[in-house]
């Protein structure tokens, strides 16, 4: 019996859209650190899913399989408005990188860096959190920081960056900032909480660049 073909939706990748083969979809997501993609049984399902976002599709699958999501809106709650949010944007991965921090409630930009010619999203997310911590320390603020990157949050916790990006003349300035960021974490104490932005329930991070 012939295997039923699948369709692949890529929400985040080198190119986005609906692809008819895994080979085509894989080209867009392989090595792309924050890729968002999913397979569907029919073209209509794929087209409908692409009109929404990745998290809606994941939650719909979870609801269909188990009757409930692994998290609930009641359990997650709402984001703290008295906080700052950080995010990074990268045109390619690696590619041209920038990051920023904003007031969560107003989206007013508090700081912004870049573009750097060659970086990755996770490096940008890491630098954004460190920049946020230093910014808040300078202003004697204990506000929490929201980031949607589990990887960057773990790098902050471990005071170490584990990236596959090779250091070279093109990204030397960026890596110098990474070195300074690690040194800052080693030499400073902070009480600010670093919280995970729950995109599935709250929508995009307020610091998101909106370039998907």
Image (cartoon, helix red, strand yellow):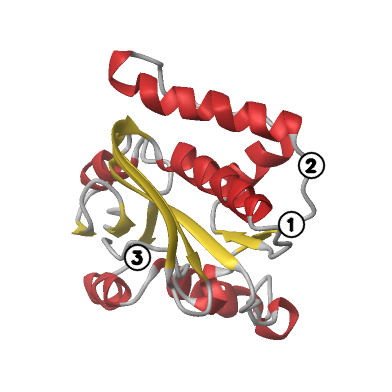
At horizontal 50% and vertical 57% (from top left) the residue drawn is 86
At horizontal 22% and vertical 70% (from top left) the residue drawn is 43
Which marked residue is nearer to the observer: mark 2 or mark 3?
2
The answer to which quarter of the image holds residue 96 is top left
Using the image as rendered, state which of residue 75 and residue 49 is in the foreground.
Answer: 75
At horizontal 37% and vertical 71% (from top left) the residue drawn is 53
Label 1, label 3: how far apart the Cα atoms are: 41 Å
- Give the SS element for disc 2: loop
Residue 160 in view, yes or no: no
Which marked residue is nearer to the observer: mark 1 or mark 3?
1
The residue to which callout 1 is attached is 192
The residue to which callout 2 is attached is 189
Query: What percent of the width, then of the height, locates residue 58?
Result: 49, 69
Query: What percent of the width, then of the height, locates residue 191?
Result: 80, 54
Q: Earlier in the sequence, mark 1 or mark 3?
A: 3
Query: What percent of the width, then of the height, locates residue 193?
Result: 74, 58
Using the image as rendered, state which of residue 47 and residue 123 is in the foreground.
Answer: 123
- Give the SS element for disc 3: strand
The residue to which callout 3 is attached is 40
Q: Earlier in the sequence, mark 2 or mark 3?
A: 3
Q: Is residue 24 rendered to the left or right of residue 160?
A: left
């Amino acid at each position: 019996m012939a295997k039923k073909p699948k369709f692949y939706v890529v929400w985040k990748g080198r190119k986005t859209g609906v692809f008819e083969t895994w080979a085509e979809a894989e080209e867009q997501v392989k090595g792309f650190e924050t890729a968002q993609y999913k397979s569907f049984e029919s073209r209509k399902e794929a087209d409908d899913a692409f009109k929404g976002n990745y998290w809606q599709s994941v939650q719909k699958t979870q609801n269909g399989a188990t009757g409930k999501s692994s998290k609930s809106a009641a359990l997650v709650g709402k984001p703290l408005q008295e906080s700052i949010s950080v995010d990074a944007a990268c045109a390619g991965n690696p590619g041209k990188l920038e990051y920023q921090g904003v007031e969560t409630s107003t989206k007013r930009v508090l700081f912004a860096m870049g573009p750097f010619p060659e970086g990755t999203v996770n490096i940008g997310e890491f630098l954004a959190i460190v920049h946020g911590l230093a910014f808040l320390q300078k202003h004697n603020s204990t506000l929490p920081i929201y980031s949607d990157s589990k990887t960057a949050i773990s790098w902050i916790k471990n005071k170490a960056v584990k990236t596959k990006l090779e250091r070279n003349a093109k990204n030397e300035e960026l890596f110098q900032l990474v070195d300074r960021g690690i040194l800052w974490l080693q030499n400073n104490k902070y009480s600010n909480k670093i919280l995970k932005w729950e995109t599935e329930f709250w929508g995009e991070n307020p610091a998101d660049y909106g370039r998907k």
